[in-house]
Image (cartoon, helix red, strand yellow):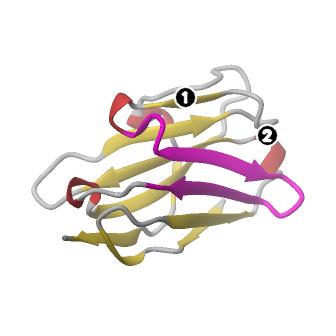
Amino acid sequence: VQLQASGGGWVQVGGSLRLSCVVSGRTFGTLIMGWFRQAPGKEREFLSTIDWSGGRTRYVDSVKGRFTISRDNAKNTVYLQMNSLKPEDTAVYYCAADTSLVRGLTTGRDNYNYWGQGTLVTVSS
């Protein structure tokens, strides 16, 4: 399974970005997808996850109401729409795939067995 993340960049405080992650090598509709981020000197943290159909999602409290995860199974792509960005959102953002067919939504980093290369988001004041 290969994951290619894109859409990062520089944005001012309060701005928006949409990250995309294209998946190949596996039937996309069988994958639980997640987004994580890692700021300098910090652990990689869970942000959001979405189930196979896109009908269920979960978010970390710090991004609820600002970030929206979605997926387009026809395009093998998962998205992360990020609004009202803050300087503390500056990080490398990673998409990840969980191939388990029984686990369901999970926030655990170790449950995701495939990762994209990361895309840098910089929020400047």
Query: At numbered mark 1, what does the secondary structure look like: helix, strand or loop?
Result: strand
Q: Residue furthest left?
A: 41
Neighbours of disc 2 within 10 Å: few (<14), some (14-19), many (20+): some
Residue beneath label 2, please?
30
Left/right placement of residue 29 relative to residue 64 reads: right
Q: Is residue 104 above or below residue 49?
A: above
Q: Residues within 10 Å of mark 1 (few under 14, many from 20)?
A: some
Whether the magenta-drawn stretch holds residue 70 is answered as: yes
Q: Which residues are magenta?
A: 63-83
The answer to whether 39 is drawn above or below residue 48 in the figure is below
- Depth order, front residue of 111/65: 65
Q: Residue at x 82, y 44 (%)?
A: 29
Q: Residue furthest front?
A: 14
Q: Name the disc covering residue 26, or none.
A: none
Which quadrant is the C terminus positioned in? bottom left
Q: Quick check: 53 left or right of 31? A: right
